Each structure stands twice: as C-alpha cells, then as structure tokens.
C-alpha cells in the first residue's frame, strides 16, 4: 500500500468527487483515479459507491478512511518533528524554473526573497522541462508557466499565482520595411521567427474572441533559445511570438511593438509546484507564500535597480 494512494484517497473522501479533488488540490484527475484504482486493487474491495455526481464511501471505504487519516496525519507530524529539529540549522532551498521564465520573472522574485530572508541559502537553477520534472531531481520548488507534464507532475502539489498570454511582436524597423499585417492571413507574406526549442510552439494557435487561427511559422531563421529569437526580432529579422512579460522591457523602450494585437494565445497558468510529501515544509511554504503575496503582475527586465512589480494586474 502506497502512502501517496492513501493521500489521494483522503482527498477524494473530503471532496466526495475525483473531479472536485483534482480541482481543489490542483492535481491531475487521471492521477487521482489511478491511485484510487491501485488502492482498490491492492485491497480487493470497492471503496466508493456512486450516488449521482457524488462518491459515497462503501462500508470498506469507511473503515479505511478512519485509518487513512490517522496514517497521513502521523506522517505529517513526523515530518513536522524533523523539520522543527532542523530549524536551527542552515536552510538550503533549490528552486527550478525554465528558460526565459526563470531569467525574466523568477530571478527578480528570488532576489527579493533573498533580501527578506537572509538566513536562507537559495540555489536558483534554470533548467529544461525534462530536467525540472525528472524523478531524480532534488528541487524543493518549481516555478512553472503552462500545464506541467501530467505523468511527471502527478505526485506534486501546485499553487497557481497568475497567468499570461503570448502575442506577436516585431521591431519598428521590420514594420517600416515590410508593413504591418492586418489579418492573420497576411502573415504568410512575412518572415516568422520560430522558437524550435523544448518550450517553443511549432504551431501558433491564436484567438480573437470566438475566432481562432493556426499559424505554421516559416522563415529563414529559427532557434531553440527564446532570447535569440527575441534578439532576432529586435534586429529587424521578422515577427516572433512572445509572452508579454518576456518583452516588457522592449515594449517600454520601443524596440518591439505588438502585431495583430487582438490575437493572443490561450492564457497559461503560472504556478509553484513541490512534491506532495513535502507540503508541510515551512521553508518551502514560506517561499511559495512570498511568491503568492508579492506577485501582482509581472516584473520588468531583470538586473536593473528600477525593476518593480506592475500593480493592478489580474491574478486569477
């Protein structure tokens, strides 16, 4: 019997629904279902009975529920005791983030956290997605944009703290020479710069209200690094697709400007993830609470004294 299955079981018990448990705890529904099936298979009994949209405990489920809560609570108390014992020692936190999200957004947040928590030693690692969610990773917390890989993140707990969209941008010099497209169909006549890296989109899905188009970017230039793609756009080489926070500095300085501004990607969540069994670690909780409290929009370009958070941005 696996502890993670018991934890999943107690979450379903509390919510009386797998879907609601997945929503409330930001966990993949498939992972909760898999844990429940594995637990029922191990015990050889059905733990729930369906009543409309609710899952009601069977007689066997009622017996297990009482014990499962005691087991998970005992594990939490054990973790608390160890953490309390370690509280007087130096604290080391390893934080992971992908590519431009880490360098543009997470970096300034971590720097402010270091300033406010000088007793902690932080290690910020910019990593590929496959490295962030590798089962042997020793990261304490992951700051991530978009939906994490379901299988790799099935045993992690997520807290959402914002969202972002991406749109098309080009330099004034490029637009002066080639004109600005007025419709998505006009993009066929333009040089589109593709990010062909791990986090890049091979197809650009853009929507404007109820309308949606799929663009297959073609051009003579591509890169697996979004900083190179952005540099190429700044140097008049074509039109690129960037998240708004990634080009905030270029927009403010006038080196890039939106193209087809009303056409954007679907909003993607920003979230902090940590392994479920570490959800009571006070130091990780302190970091995540800091991110949730301080994040109120996006930071500007990093490493500048004037970098401040934008106020009044939607966090939902």
Image: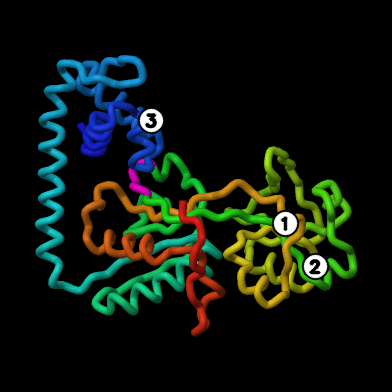
Which residue is denoted by mark 3 in the rendering?
A: 19
Of 302 and 2, nearer the camera is 302
Of 138 and 255, nearer the camera is 255
Residue 45, picture quadrant: top left
207 within the magenta span: no
Q: Tell me the quarter of the image containing the N terminus.
A: top left
Could you say where residue 229 lies in the image, as x and y percent from the top left?
69, 65
Secondary element type, mark 3: helix
Q: What residue is at 33 percent from the left and 53 percent from the top?
A: 274
What are the residue bounds of the magenta stretch? 154-158
> How many angstroms separate mark 2 from mark 1 (CA)?
19 Å
Is residue 103 shown to the viewer in this render? no
**N-term-proximal mark, 3 vs 1:** 3
Which residue is denoted by mark 2 in the rendering?
A: 237
In this rendering, which labeled residue sits more in front, label 2 or label 1? 1
Q: Which mark is residue 18?
A: none
**Would you say the magenta stretch is mainly helix, strand or loop?**
strand
* Vertical position of residue 24 compared to residue 84: above or below: above
Could you say where residue 86 lies in the image, as x and y percent from the top left?
14, 66
């Amino acid at each position: 019997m696996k502890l993670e299955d018991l934890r999943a079981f107690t979450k379903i018990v509390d919510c009386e629904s797998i879907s609601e448990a997945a929503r409330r705890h930001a966990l993949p529904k498939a992972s909760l279902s898999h844990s429940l099936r594995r637990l029922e298979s191990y015990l050889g009994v059905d733990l729930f009975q369906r009543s409309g949209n609710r899952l009601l405990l069977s007689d066997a489920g009622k017996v297990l529920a009482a014990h499962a809560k005691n087991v998970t609570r005992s594990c939490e108390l054990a973790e608390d005791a160890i953490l309390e014992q370690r509280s007087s020692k130096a604290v080391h936190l390893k934080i992971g983030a992908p590519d431009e999200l880490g360098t543009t957004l997470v970096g300034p947040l971590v720097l402010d956290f270091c300033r406010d928590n000088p007793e902690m030693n932080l290690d910020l690692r910019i990593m590929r997605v496959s490295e962030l969610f590798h089962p042997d990773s020793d990261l304490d917390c992951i700051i991530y944009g978009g939906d994490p890989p379901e299988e790799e993140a099935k045993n992690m707990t997520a807290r959402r703290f914002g969202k972002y969209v991406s749109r098309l941008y080009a330099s004034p010099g490029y637009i002066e020479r080639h004109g600005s497209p007025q419709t998505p169909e006009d993009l066929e006549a333009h040089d589109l710069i593709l990010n062909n890296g791990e986090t890049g989109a091979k197809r650009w899905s853009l929507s404007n209200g109820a309308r949606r188009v799929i663009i297959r970017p073609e051009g003579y230039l591509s890169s697996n690094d979004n900083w190179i793609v952005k540099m190429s756009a700044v140097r008049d080489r074509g039109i690129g697709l960037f998240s708004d926070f990634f080009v905030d500095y270029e927009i403010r300085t006038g080196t890039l400007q939106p193209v087809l501004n009303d056409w954007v990607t679907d909003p993607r969540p920003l979230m902090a993830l940590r392994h479920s069994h570490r959800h009571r670690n006070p130091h990780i909780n302190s970091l995540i609470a800091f991110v949730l409290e301080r994040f109120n929009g996006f930071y500007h370009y990093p490493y500048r004294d004037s970098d401040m958070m934008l106020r009044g941005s939607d966090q939902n």
